[in-house]
Image (cartoon, rainbow, N blue to C red):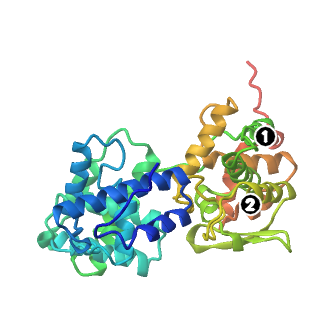
């Protein structure tokens, strides 16, 4: 097939675009398709008499509509064209999208709250997002100019409006986020009353919802369900080994970096909750699974994150949802039904107890800050609890 010619306003950027897509890890077929769309965009701009400096959002939408009108089945939306337009913006050939200004009083307030959560509280992105969602929902029913007149009745009405079918833990998160927002409003002088004191606390019971741990055979079946002949299987197997053997959380696995693997000392550095950093011994079988992935499964990339997307762009996995899918698919292959990533953390505790370990050892492996957190894991070993239970006295008549 003849090489497509790019002779319009994008002619100086086509080779750079091709090389950029190659660096991102796209296959030769994908690069070929992208360059074809690049050439189509160039021809369309030339026919319309439009220059690169006029590639605004409206112009991209017009080109996407033209693609749809021509019967295109790929790269026919603004989002689908992002590899092309994003490259041109990074090269300074297309105008960069302006940063949206906070225009309304509510947006200004929420932006202040977001900076407070990040700068003053030091919360992780997931916690910031949770707080912002609740604050945004709360502000929908209240005008910012009347916050000084906000009362406990308004707060109670918001709480009563929450769905009745929510689990206690979900509602507890909402109440925690609402309490945080109301404290911010009081500290910043937006309200004259400490309304956070009126937000009720959920009555919860420690370990009431502790998930059922997997047996040793089930956890082995979960790990062995991964196809070690494929890059995806090698990656998923290493991730599952870290969760099953070291009790790592989903977020800790995706945040793991190459520098956290201390091969000389046989240790692993784990960046946990609340900014806590711990160093644990790296078991031989877990280390071997990671080595197999790094050697035979990890795509070539400049990223220092250990676990990388198999398909381009080769970047780190984006948070917990991909890990949820990896665990769920492995459980399906192993015939285990529905399994969640955090269930593997309880499996780690169960196996430590089964091997004669103590609650103190569980706390060290799972990196608990408080002994009370570890104490709930006593529930997973019913047989050992039965040994210390006193018999119920028999009543005779």
Q: Secondary structure at mark 1?
A: helix
Query: Left or right of 154: which side holds 324?
Result: right
Label 2 residue SS: helix
The residue indicated by pointer 1 is 220
Q: Name the residue located 58 percent from the left edge and 67 percent from the top edge.
A: 273
Q: Identify whether 286 is placed above or below 258.
A: above
Mark nearer the N terminus (2 vs 1): 1
Picture quarter with the C terminus = top right
Residue at figure coordinates x 56%, y 46% from the top left: 324
Quarter location, residue 54:
bottom left
Please rate how many residues cluster around mark 2, counting C-alpha atoms within 10 Å: few if below 14, some from 14 to 19, many from 20. Answer: some
Q: Which residue is mark 2?
A: 294
Query: Residue 301: which quarter of the image?
Result: bottom right
Q: Position of residue 354 (x, y in %)?
A: 83, 45
Q: CA distance from mark 2 to mark 1?
A: 21 Å
Where residue 239 appears, x then y in whole percent?
69, 53
Q: Is residue 152 visible?
A: no
Q: Residue 185 at x, y = what percent?
A: 27, 74
Looking at the rendered image, the disc whose residue lies closer to the viewer, 2 or 1, is 2
Q: Residue at x 76, y 64 (%)?
A: 364
Q: Is residue 107 visible?
A: yes
Residue at 55% from the left image edge and 54% from the top image edge: 28
Q: Give the vertical position of 268 relative to 64 (above or below).
A: below
């Amino acid at each position: 097939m003849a090489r497509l010619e790019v002779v319009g306003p994008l002619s100086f950027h086509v080779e750079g675009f091709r090389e950029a897509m190659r660096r991102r890890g796209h296959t030769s077929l994908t690069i070929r398709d992208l360059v074809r769309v690049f050439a189509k965009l160039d021809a369309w701009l030339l026919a319309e008499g439009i220059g690169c400096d006029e590639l605004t959002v409206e112009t991209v939408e017009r080109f996407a509509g033209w693609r749809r009108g021509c019967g295109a089945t790929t790269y026919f939306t603004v989002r689908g064209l992002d590899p092309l337009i994003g490259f041109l913006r990074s090269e300074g050939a297309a105008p960069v999208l302006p940063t949206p200004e906070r225009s309304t009083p509510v947006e200004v307030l929420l932006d202040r709250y977001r900076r407070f959560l990040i700068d003053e509280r030091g919360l992780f992105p997931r916690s910031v997002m949770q707080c912002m969602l609740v604050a945004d929902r709360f502000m929908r029913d209240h005008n910012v100019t009347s916050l000084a007149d906000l009362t406990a009745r308004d707060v109670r009405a918001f709480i009563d409006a929450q769905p009745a079918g929510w689990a206690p833990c979900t509602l507890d998160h909402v109440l925690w986020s609402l309490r945080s927002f109301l404290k911010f409003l009081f500290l910043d002088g937006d309200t004259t009353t400490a309304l956070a004191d009126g937000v009720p606390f959920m009555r919860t019971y420690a370990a009431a919802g502790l998930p059922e741990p997997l047996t040793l055979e089930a956890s082995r079946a979960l790990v062995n369900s991964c196809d070690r002949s494929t890059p995806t299987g090698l990656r998923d197997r290493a991730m599952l080994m870290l969760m099953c053997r070291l009790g790592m959380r989903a977020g800790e696995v995706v945040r793991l970096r190459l520098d956290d693997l201390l091969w000389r000392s046989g240790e692993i550095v784990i960046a946990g909750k609340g900014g806590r950093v711990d160093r644990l011994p790296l078991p031989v079988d877990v280390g071997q699974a990671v080595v197999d992935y790094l050697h035979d499964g990890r795509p070539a990339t400049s990223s220092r994150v250990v676990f990388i997307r198999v398909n381009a762009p080769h970047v780190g996995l984006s948070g917990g949802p991909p890990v949820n899918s990896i665990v769920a698919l492995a459980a399906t292959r192993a015939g285990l039904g529905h399994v969640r990533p955090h269930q593997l953390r309880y499996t780690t505790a169960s196996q430590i107890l089964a091997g004669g370990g103590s609650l103190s050892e569980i706390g060290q492996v799972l990196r608990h800050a408080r002994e009370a957190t570890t104490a709930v894991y006593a529930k997973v070993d019913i047989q050992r609890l039965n040994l210390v239970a006193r018999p119920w006295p028999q009543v005779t008549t």
